């Protein structure tokens, strides 16, 4: 069994949904040494999230942002946690709805994503700092 793990920093992204598949793979080149296994990406933040979805049509990412803003609006009168601005509590709710990690099978030294799938960084804050990810790859 092989196990590789590293923590990486992403540059700050504007609010929205961003493809990071290539960046993540460029940081975890050890995937090529695994014939059969799993790759996990975990985000160490409570106001951003990760998901896997459409990697070809950028309008899907725009629609995700629009829908999440409708589903979890800013300025809801019942929010108590607003010290960091109107996007603070909505960002935490969106992050919990979307999730803090994704797992992808590794087959023959490559991620076994569907042809139209990519890893998204879901940035839910208006002015976010860079984000920290933990990348783990393991298998035989």
Image (cartoon, rainbow, N blue to C red):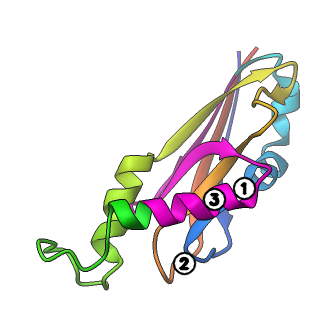
Lower sequence index among marks 3 and 2? 3
- The residue that appears at 20% across and 74% down in the rendered structure is 76
Task: State the image coordinates of residue 42 (x, y, percent, origin top left).
Answer: 54, 46
- For the N terminus, the quadrant is top right
Can residue 123 be seen here? The reply is no
Disc 1 to disc 3, how far (Cα)? Answer: 12 Å
| Crowd tier of the residue under label 1, counting other residues whose Cα lies within 10 Å: few below 14, some 14–19, many 20 or above | some
Mark 1 vs 3: CB contact within 8 A: no
Reply above or below: 34 against 17.
above
- On whether residue 105 falls in the magenta region, the answer is no
Q: What's the distance in space between the residues labelled 1 and 2, CA to CA?
A: 16 Å
- In the image, residue 11 sits, relative to residue 37, either above or below, namely below
Magenta segment includes 66? yes
Q: Point out the image quarter for the C terminus.
A: top right
Marks 1, 2: nearer the viewer: 1
Q: What is the count of numbered marks?
A: 3
Q: Nearer the viewer, residue 133 or 7?
A: 133
Name the residue located 68 percent from the left edge and 73 percent from the top edge.
11
Sequence-wise first label, 1 or 3: 1
Q: Residues within 10 Å of mark 3 (few under 14, many from 20)?
A: many
Instruction: Report which residue position mark 2 lands on.
Output: 129
Query: Is there CB contact under 8 Å for labels 3 and 2?
Result: no
Residue 3 drawn at (x, y percent): 68, 27
The residue singled out by tag 3 in the image is: 61
59 or 92, nearer to the observer: 59
Residue that label 1 marks: 20
Let me know if residue 98 appears in the view. yes
Q: Secondary structure at mark 3?
A: helix
Q: CA distance from mark 3 to mark 2?
A: 20 Å
On the picture, is 68 further left or further right than 80? right
Query: Magenta residues, as a range?
Result: 38-67
Q: Residue at x 22, y 80 (%)?
A: 82
């Amino acid at each position: 069994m092989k196990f590789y793990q590293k923590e990486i920093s992403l540059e700050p992204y504007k609010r929205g949904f961003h493809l990071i598949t290539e960046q993540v793979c460029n940081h975890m080149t050890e995937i090529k040494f695994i014939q059969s296994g799993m790759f996990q990406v975990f985000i160490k933040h409570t106001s951003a999230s990760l998901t896997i979805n459409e990697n070809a049509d950028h309008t899907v990412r725009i629609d995700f942002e629009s829908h999440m803003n409708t589903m979890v609006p800013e300025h809801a009168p019942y929010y108590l946690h607003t010290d960091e601005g109107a996007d603070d509590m909505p960002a935490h709710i969106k992050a919990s709805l979307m999730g803090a990690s994704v797992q992808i099978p590794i087959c023959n030294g490559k991620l076994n994503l569907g042809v139209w799938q990519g890893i998204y960084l879901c940035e839910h804050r208006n002015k976010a700092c860079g984000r920290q990810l933990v990348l783990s790859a393991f298998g035989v």
